[in-house]
Image (tube, grey):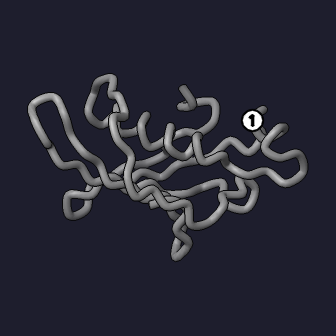
Amino acid sequence: MLLDEFYKITDNRIENEKHIYSIQLNSKHAIYHGHFPNIPVVPGVCMIELVKEVAEKEKMGKTMLQKASNIKFLSIIDPNAHSCIFLELQFQQSTTNEFSVSAKLYKAEIIFLK
């Protein structure tokens, strides 16, 4: 779990059925010592985990990623330059126990993940 150590949720709101979260990244986290020293970059797997954890928090339960299609990593996240980013989630209920989520990590006009 990355919440509270790697990132914190500082705010959240709903706009037009989109859940928008302000995320504060911890630029001092140990993961950046290996990814990469002196040039920190948020690993793609951490971006996916962040989306999953926030979706779980929103849906109030443990989730399992069954399928991930059309994930696009569009820009790198340097935690020193972009310590505060936004996560936008939009949910669609598929069945009683399943839902799909569309996600976007961004800061202003820069889209990191979609």
Q: Quadrant of residue 8?
A: top right
Q: Position of residue 101 (x, y in %)?
A: 29, 48
Q: Image point 68% across, 41% down: which residue?
A: 26
Q: Position of residue 20 (x, y in %)?
A: 36, 55
User: Residue furthest toward the right?
Assistant: 38
Q: Image point 37% across, 52% down: which residue?
A: 69
Q: Is residue 87 above or below residue 109?
A: above
Left or right: where does residue 50 sit relative to residue 67? right
Which quadrant of the figure contains the C terminus? Answer: bottom left
- The amino acid pointed to by label 1 is Ile
Left or right: where does residue 72 sit relative to residue 96? right
Q: Quadrant of residue 112?
A: bottom right
User: Residue furthest toward the left?
Assistant: 96
Left or right: where does residue 53 sit relative to residue 75? left
Left or right: where does residue 39 sit relative to residue 78? right
Q: Residues within 10 Å of mark 1 (few under 14, many from 20)?
A: some
Q: Nearer the viewer, residue 25 or 70?
A: 70
User: Residue furthest toward the bottom?
Assistant: 109
- The local secondary structure at tag 1 comes to helix
Q: Give the number of marks.
A: 1
Q: Is residue 19 above or below residue 15?
A: above
Q: Quadrant of residue 51?
A: top left
Which quadrant of the figure contains the N terminus? Answer: top right
Q: Image point 13% across, 42% down: which residue?
A: 94
Task: Read off the residue under disc 1.
Answer: 31
Q: Nearer the viewer, residue 77 or 66?
A: 66
Q: Position of residue 3 (x, y in %)?
A: 53, 31
Q: Image point 9% across, 31% down: which residue?
A: 96
Q: Position of residue 88 (x, y in %)?
A: 38, 56
